[in-house]
Amino acid sequence: MTSRSFKATARTSSEARAVARTQTLIKGQDGIGTVRRTTLPGGLRIVTETLPSVRSATFGIWAHVGSRDETPALNGATHYLEHLLFKGTDKRSALDISAAVDAVGGEMNAFTAKEYTCYYARVLDTDLPLAIDVVCDMLTGSLIREEDVDVERGAILEEIAMTEDDAGDCVHDLFAHTMFGDNALGRPVLGTVDTVNALTADRIRRFYKKHYDPTHLVVAAAGNIDHATVVRQVRAAFEKSGALRDNGAQPIAPREGSRTIRTAGRVELVGRKTEQAHVILGMPGLARTDDRRWAMSVLNTALGGGMSSRLFQEVREKRGLAYSVYSYTSGFADCGLFGVYAGCRPSQVHDVLKICRDELDQVAANGLSDDEVNRAIGQLKGGTVLGLEDTGALMNRIGKSELCWGDHMSVDDMLARITAVTPDEVRSVARDILGQRPSLSVIGPLKDKQAARLNDAVA
């Protein structure tokens, strides 16, 4: 099924601005898996995927704002705001918000990333109207009171402290800083103790008004749902709050990003008294819109995506040098990262790094075998389908697709793209990505002589 972009739905007359526009983006079989989009006057987009065979539904609202949109002084504001939207509206207190969803056995949460934020609730299909009402109320009617900002500041500082205590998590923030330096992509999503302490209710309110306009939002719902009913209920909730107006506004286009500085050969070490040393060796990757991302996914899977991967076999199975070792990719609007993570005893750091660097260099020079490529393709296809077998995953897929790409691809099309990856394409992207000089981030209790040798891994 050919994907379609919202760019093709631009209004052509003043009369069209008064009418909600609905498209079928992916036509499922017998209605199953059908994806539809409605764009309301005022620029709010609503996308749904229908799955009549389940008894649940997941409703989410995606905001086109992440930590990348923060100035240095506002670092952490997006995540802070995520917390505050749960603290109450004119209609509901914080307890009312949580109790409403708890009372029907549902679950509600949110997450903040570098380039977007998402709020969602998963409930029984019969309770979807409640989820829509609660989440829409949170997004459009948050009070952001001074006292709530002060209370939640303590919770966020505890969250930062919890992350700092988990070196295996913290090293990923360190790697982002190693690669991107002191710009928005290199700063932590949570912010720092200093920036969080400096944020005021007034600054957060201004941030909220700027980034939570309906043109910056995508509503996504998946499960045993009816598209027209979801549209009607969402429209009523937004119009009741006064957030939706027929002002001719267009939905914001997918983020294009700007030129992001990426470094090579840089080493950052944070000394910490931990039982393990946590390391990430990596280099610039691909933007999420790069056509080579399919081949990159196959390469990443074969290198460190499972128990049969090269890194797992060489580092853990053959030598027992680490319990956890894997590779990963992160794609942003204009750039990306490829990294290899391992947690090991401090005395084994240099052995682990040498093995990982040798494997990356070997694959960059010689590529993967056809058997490795075919196995990785099969693993990716199976993981793709199995990972979409709940309504939360479906909601995430369509919401992120609409916000980040502006178009949608059916599961069959995704599987076809993965299947079409050739060994030559994987070898080409391996040369381009793995042939770059890597950078290194380490957290652990390394001694001076060990630390001095870290540069060997990126030489």
Image (spheres, grey):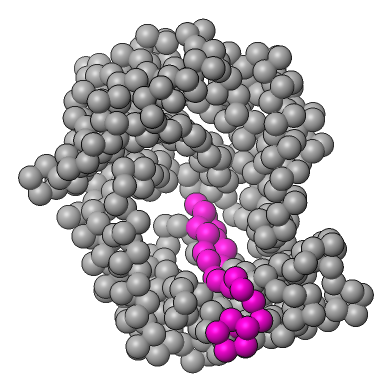
Q: Is residue 423 left or right of residue 182?
A: left
User: Which residue is at 49% across, 11% downward?
Assistant: 92
Residue 346's x, y, as percent? 79, 75
First to last magenta residue range? 315-338
Of the pair 196 and 295, the residue shown nearer to us:
196
Question: Which picture quadrant has residue 253?
Answer: top left
From where the camera sits, is residue 268 visible?
A: no
Of the pair 181 and 330, the residue shown nearer to us:
330
Residue 348's x, y, as percent? 75, 81
Q: Is residue 209 left or right of residue 71?
A: left
Name above or below for residue 159 compared with residue 299: above
Asked whether 337 falls inside the magenta stretch, the response is: yes
Asked whether 14 falls inside the magenta stretch, the response is: no
User: Which residue is at 58% across, 19% downward?
Assistant: 87
Residue 404's x, y, as percent? 42, 46
Of the pair 412 and 424, the residue shown nearer to us:
412
Name above or below for residue 247 compared with residue 284: above
For the image shown, how many numbered marks are present on the structure? 0
Of the pair 223 and 259, the residue shown nearer to us:
223
Question: Which picture quadrant has residue 339?
Answer: bottom right
Viewport quadrant of the C terminus: bottom right
User: Which residue is at 73% across, 37% downward?
Assistant: 158
Viewport quadrant of the N terminus: bottom left
Q: Is residue 333 left or right of residue 158?
A: left
Residue 455's x, y, as percent? 79, 78
From where the camera sits, is residue 101 visible?
A: yes
> Which residue sits furthest right?
448
User: Which residue is at 42% across, 10% downward?
Assistant: 242
Name above or below for residue 118 compared with residue 176: above
Name above or below for residue 68 compared with residue 308: above
